[in-house]
Image (cartoon, grey):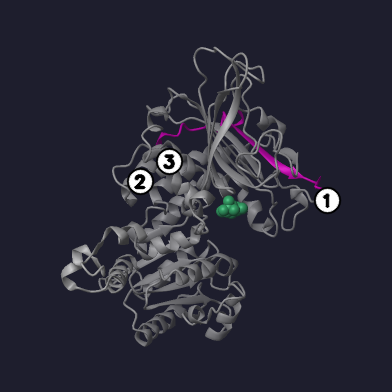
């Protein structure tokens, strides 16, 4: 903006500054600039609306949604006429609600202006007869605060209510309107298998149109995930290499150092395949493998992601063991601390076969990717927390040099780090100074922290703002969610129907079952084992 400001400045004879396009107005620069900024802000400011959060006394609201709204408020990205109405069963007044959520806001800042935008209504969301009262409260709030007839409904509730709440909203006419917008944000899980996902989509579409539905996959809200699009499509030098001719394989690792913590009850019914692969990791695959979209618009991008999902070569129930490995963490000592095994966790049955680790190999059957293996793995209680995409390029066709590790070719890798230490690193061979032609693998890296000193916006901050602005690009579309379930369903079936498929144990704090470590095919090629820092080498790896 500063640059733009400088470009617009011309000096008059008295060296008083003016904006050139506005010279005739003879206004001092700062006045014009303020008007200009105000208009830009107005253009990108979402329309006045009420955000209704169902499940307002829950964890997600306190930990993620309210802090994200506060950050938006601080950046002046919320509309001037705006309110949040928290809804849940617990009997609370507006003041009680404000007090509760303020615990999750910065203690050393004056949050009162923000807090005063929050209201609360106790509603038994499972009970349709409570909804007329909700409608009246919304109308009163709108009138009192002069808010337009626009609503976003956020379902931050147990999934059982995903069908009930939309039906109850429809019953009181809060689902559609010609006077303003009605949007519905749904949190994952979008079903627990293909059948329930199809059913959920069908039911949601009874009351809301697809373009009113915003299915959150918080991975898509991560700045670095969006950067996958920019890395690929803003740089002409990468795209010619981005295919089966040059890429040996693609690897995605999403490692978590924590176990299931207090979520054993939920997790045991889900497992890593449903919890991480069906949604977050397949979305990453979609962005890595997609064709260039026609525009950066919601439909253009989501059409391309859908095409990738439709081209996934389906693993069948019969060949699951050739493609997928599941594991479960067992009791262990991590850095001197005794850690429970998964089956000892609260809410987990002692004979549970739920996977806390998955590694899989699959192909994408299309022109660009035919024959290129994609490997993905994710797990709880792995040695570190890191999510990254690794593109391993094929070796040079003629090995002229020897690396100092005495292998014949250098490593050509592109590592895209999603978190932490967000950035990108390229690895390739360089000549070791001195006699001969020894080659050493070196890294060239870029870190997000070099580009901006500002903190990166959180995923929820970005996604909430997008929904307020009516931009669904970073939300999952129903057809893609269904296609992703179609892909994982045979794996779910095989694991359910065939007890002989092993659940491999791995000691908490290790890189998963040993069998998964040898999964990647190719001479001397193995997974990249990420460290806390993107550029860590084999000699130094902080976890
Ligand atoms: C959630 C899963 O969707 O994603 C959690 O339910 C997982 O089990 C989390 O821990 C990982 O998200 P992030 O942003 O920490 O990588």
The residue singled out by tag 2 in the image is 301
The residue singled out by tag 3 in the image is 231
Q: Is residue 498 above or below residue 257?
A: above
Residue 312 lies within the magenta run: yes
Q: Nearer the viewer, residue 108 or 325?
A: 108
Q: Label 1, secondary structure: give it.
A: strand
Where residue 260 appears, as percent x and y from the top left, is: 68, 53
Where residue 6 appears, as percent x and y from the top left, is: 31, 60
Q: Nearer the viewer, residue 414 or 506?
A: 414
Which quadrant does the C terminus fall into? top right
Callout 2 touching callout 1 (CB < 8 Å)? no
Residue farthest toward the front in the current orientation of the protein? 14
The residue singled out by tag 1 in the image is 338
Where residue 390 appears, as percent x and y from the top left, is: 54, 35
Which quadrant does the N terminus fall into? bottom left
Q: How far is disc 3 from disc 1 in space, using C-alphas?
A: 42 Å
Label 2 Cα neighbours within 10 Å, binned few <14 / some 14-19 / many ≥20: many
């Amino acid at each position: 903006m500063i640059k733009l400001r400088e470009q617009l400045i011309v000096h008059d004879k008295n060296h008083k500054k003016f904006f050139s396009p506005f010279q005739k107005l003879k206004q001092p620069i700062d006045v014009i600039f303020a008007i200009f900024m105000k208009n830009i802000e107005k253009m990108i400011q979402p329309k006045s609306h009420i955000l209704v959060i169902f499940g307002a006394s829950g964890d997600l609201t306190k930990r993620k949604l309210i802090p994200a709204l506060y950050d938006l408020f601080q950046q002046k990205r919320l509309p001037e006429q705006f309110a949040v109405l928290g809804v849940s069963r617990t009997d609370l007044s507006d003041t009680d609600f404000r007090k509760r959520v303020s615990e999750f806001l910065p203690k050393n800042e004056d949050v009162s202006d923000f807090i005063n935008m929050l209201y609360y209504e106790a509603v038994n969301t499972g009970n349709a007869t409570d909804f007329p009262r909700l409608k009246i409260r919304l109308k009163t709030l709108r009138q009192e605060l002069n808010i337009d007839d626009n609503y976003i409904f956020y379902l931050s509730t147990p999934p059982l209510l995903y069908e009930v709440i939309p039906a109850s909203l429809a019953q009181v006419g809060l689902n559609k309107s010609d006077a303003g917008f009605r949007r519905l944000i749904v949190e994952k899980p979008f079903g627990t298998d293909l059948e329930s996902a199809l059913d959920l989509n069908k039911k949601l579409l009874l009351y809301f149109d697809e373009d009113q539905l915003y299915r959150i996959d918080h991975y898509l809200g991560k700045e670095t995930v969006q950067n996958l699009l920019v890395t690929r499509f803003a740089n002409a030098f990468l795209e010619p290499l981005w295919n089966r001719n040059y890429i040996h394989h693609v690897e995605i690792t999403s490692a978590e150092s924590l176990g299931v913590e207090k979520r054993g009850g939920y997790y045991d019914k889900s497992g890593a395949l449903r919890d991480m692969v069906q949604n977050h990791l397949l979305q990453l695959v979609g962005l890595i493998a997609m064709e260039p979209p026609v525009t950066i618009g919601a439909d253009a991008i989501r059409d391309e992601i859908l095409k990738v999902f439709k081209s996934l070569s389906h693993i069948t129930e019969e060949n699951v063991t050739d493609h997928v490995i599941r594991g479960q963490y067992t009791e262990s000592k991590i850095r001197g601390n005794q850690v429970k095994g998964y089956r000892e966790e609260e809410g987990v049955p002692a004979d549970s076969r739920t996977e806390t680790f998955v590694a899989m190999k699959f192909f994408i059957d299309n022109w660009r990717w035919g024959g290129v293996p994609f490997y993905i793995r994710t797990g709880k209680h792995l040695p570190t927390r890191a999510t990254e995409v690794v593109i391993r390029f094929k070796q040079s066709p003629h090995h002229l040099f020897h690396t100092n590790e005495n292998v014949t070719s250098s490593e050509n890798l592109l590592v895209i780090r999603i978190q932490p230490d967000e950035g990108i690193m390229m690895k390739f061979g360089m000549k070791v100074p001195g006699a001969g032609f020894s080659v050493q693998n070196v890294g060239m890296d870029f870190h997000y922290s070099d580009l901006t000193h500002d903190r990166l916006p959180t995923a929820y901050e970005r996604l909430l703002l997008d929904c307020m602005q009516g931009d669904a690009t970073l939300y999952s579309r129903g057809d893609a969610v269904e296609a992703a379930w179609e892909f994982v369903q045979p794996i779910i079936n095989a694991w359910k129907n065939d007890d002989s498929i092993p659940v491999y144990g791995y000691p908490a704090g290790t890189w998963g079952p040993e069998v998964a470590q040898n999964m990647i095919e190719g001479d001397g090629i193995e997974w990249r084992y990420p460290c806390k820092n993107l550029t860590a080498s084999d000699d130094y790896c902080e976890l």
